[in-house]
Image (tube, helix red, strand yellow):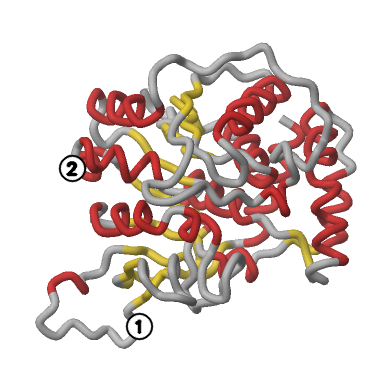
Amino acid sequence: MKGMTTKTKLIVDTDTGIDDAQALMMALAHPQAEIAAITMVSGNVHVDLVTGNVARVLDVCEADVPFYRGMAGPLIGDHVDAADIHENDGLGNSGYPPSSRRPEEEHAVQAILRLCNAAPQAYTLVALGPLTNIALAVRLDPQLPQRVKRLVVMGGTVDARGNITLAAEYNFYADPEAAHIVLSSFPKTTLISWEATIEHMAEWDWYHRWAETDTPRGRFNRAISRNYVEMAKTRFRAKGYFLPDPLAMAVALEPSLVLEAEERWATIELRGEHTRGQMVVNYPDYTGKHAQYRNNVEIIRRVEMDGFLKLLERAVTG
C-alpha cells in the first residue's frame, strides 16, 4: 500500500553486557525495526549470564522476542570474558532482579539457520559479540552468507589500536578463528571497528542528561552504566562515553546515518605472539595474483552523530 514502510527485520547475536543492552533497547524502540530473534553467545560474560541479561532487557522494554542460547565458548581455547569492564553480572552489577523469562529450547545456531533458510535475504544479522555462533552456522550451512540480507558486525581494529591487547579488539580476540571464518565466508561485512567507537564517543554532558531520563528504560540504563562511567573517567581518563554496540546497531537500523565508509579486504591474524585476533586490512590496494584480496568488508569511518544520539534518546524514552 502507498505510504507503507517496510520494517527492517533483525536477528541480533549478542553477548549482552552494558552496551549490548543499550543497543537492544535502541532496536526495540525503533518504529521501523522488528527483532525476529536474539541469539546469545559467551563473550563479555558467560552465555548463562547473557541469557539472564537479555531477559532483563526484554522485561524493562516490555517486549516479547524469542531468545536462544548459543555457544558457551570459542571454537578453539577457553572463554575470555570482559567482566573487568561489564562487572560480574555483565550489567554493571546493577542489581536488577532476575527475570522469569526462559530462552527457547532450540540452539541459537539452528535458529539462525532456520530463520534465514525460511526467508532468504529478509534479515539483517547484527553481531555484537564474538562471532562463534555465526561461524558455526556458516560451517553447518556454507550457503548462509547468500541468505543473509546484510551482516553488520561490531568488532576488529582497522589501525591496530586494540582494547584488549596492543593490536586486537575484544570481540575478535575472544574468538579469532570465528572472525576469520565469517570474514572469509560473507561477500561483504559491514564493520564498526574499535577505532570508529573512539571517534564517536558521546560527550559527558550529553551522557549525564541521557542517564537522568526518568523512565523504566532510563533508570535501567543509568543503573547498568553507572559503575562503568566511573571507571571510564578514572581508569581510562576517557574524554567521553564509549558506545560500540549502539553504534553498530545505529548503522544497522539507519544506514543513511553513514557519512563515510570504504570497502577493503581484511582478514584475521591467528598466530602472532602479539597480534593474535588483530584484523589485517589491505590499505595499499595490493591485489597482485591473490584473488583472496578482493574487498570483503565495508569499514564504517564516520556516522552522523546527531542522528545516532537521537536513536539513543529514543531507546530510553520508548
Q: Nearer the viewer, mark 1 or mark 2?
A: 2
Count neighbours of disc 2 (C-alpha within 10 A) and say few if under 14, some if 14 to 19, many if 20 or more.
few
Location of the N terminus (image quadrant): top left
User: From what the image shows, is residue 50 above or below residue 102?
Assistant: below
Q: Nearer the viewer, residue 114 or 307?
A: 114
Residue 16 in picture, x, y percent from top left: 61, 39
Q: Is residue 133 left or right of residue 19?
A: left
* Residue pictured at 36% horizontal, 52% vertical: 178
Q: Please tell me which residue lies in front, 143 or 88.
A: 88
Any mark on residue 7, and which? none
Write the residue at 48% across / 26% down: 69
Instruction: Answer left or right for 206 relative to 282.
Output: right
The total number of labels drawn is 2
Q: Quadrant of residue 215?
A: top right
Above or below for 101 versus 83: above
Judge left or right: residue 74 versus residue 59: left
Q: Residue furthest top?
A: 100
As drawn, 41 above or below 163: above
Q: Where is residue 197 shown, x and y percent of the image?
A: 61, 64
Is 206 or 143 nearer to us in this picture? 143
Name the quarter where the C terminus is drawn: top right
Mark 1 lies on a secondary structure that is loop
Q: Residue at the location (23% across, 85% down)? A: 286
Give residue 283's mark.
Answer: 1
Q: Which residue is rendered at x = 66% and y = 47% of the image? A: 19
**Label 2 SS:** loop
Which residue is tagged 2? 142
Give the x, y percent position of residue 158.
Answer: 47, 73
